[in-house]
Amino acid sequence: MRNMLNIAIPKGRLGEDEKGLDKILKKAGEECIEVIIAAKAQDKKETIYEIADLAYHVMVLMTEAGISIQEIHRELASRHIIDHKVEQEKMV
């Protein structure tokens, strides 16, 4: 199966018994925690691996919610995220 991001999402990846928004959200939450743990350990390879897992599950969520990558891009652009956010981070 391909989602609106044109990313292949293998059927059964989340498991046939794990369908639905609650399961998708649970998995995305777990992946967030794993990213934090890997980053805190300063393990670059593991952090990359976990970010990839998180990105995958966010894309699954986007597909479930009918959210396109273009909508995300527009939202980020409306915040001037590339320039403005970097400046905000420097101020902290």
Image: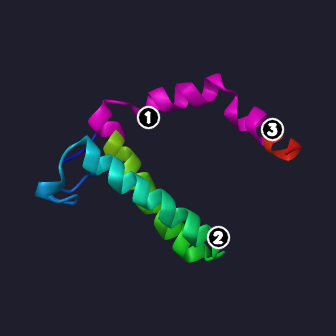
Height in image: 24 above or below 88?
Answer: below
Marks 1, 3: nearer the viewer:
3
Residue occupying the point 46% across, 29% down = 70
Residue occupying the point 27% across, 45% down = 22
Q: Is residue 15 left or right of residue 87?
A: left
User: Label 1: how many residues lie within 10 Å, few (<14), some (14-19) or many (20+)?
Assistant: some
Identify residue for label 1.
69
Magenta range: 62-86
Secondary structure beneath disc 3?
helix
Residue occupying the point 64% across, 70% down = 40
Residue type (three-letter) at the residue carrying disc 1: Ile
Residue occupying the point 54% across, 25% down = 74
Residue 89: name its quadrant: top right
Can residue 36 be seen here? yes
Which numbered dot is residue 88? 3
Q: CA distance from mark 1 to mark 3?
A: 24 Å
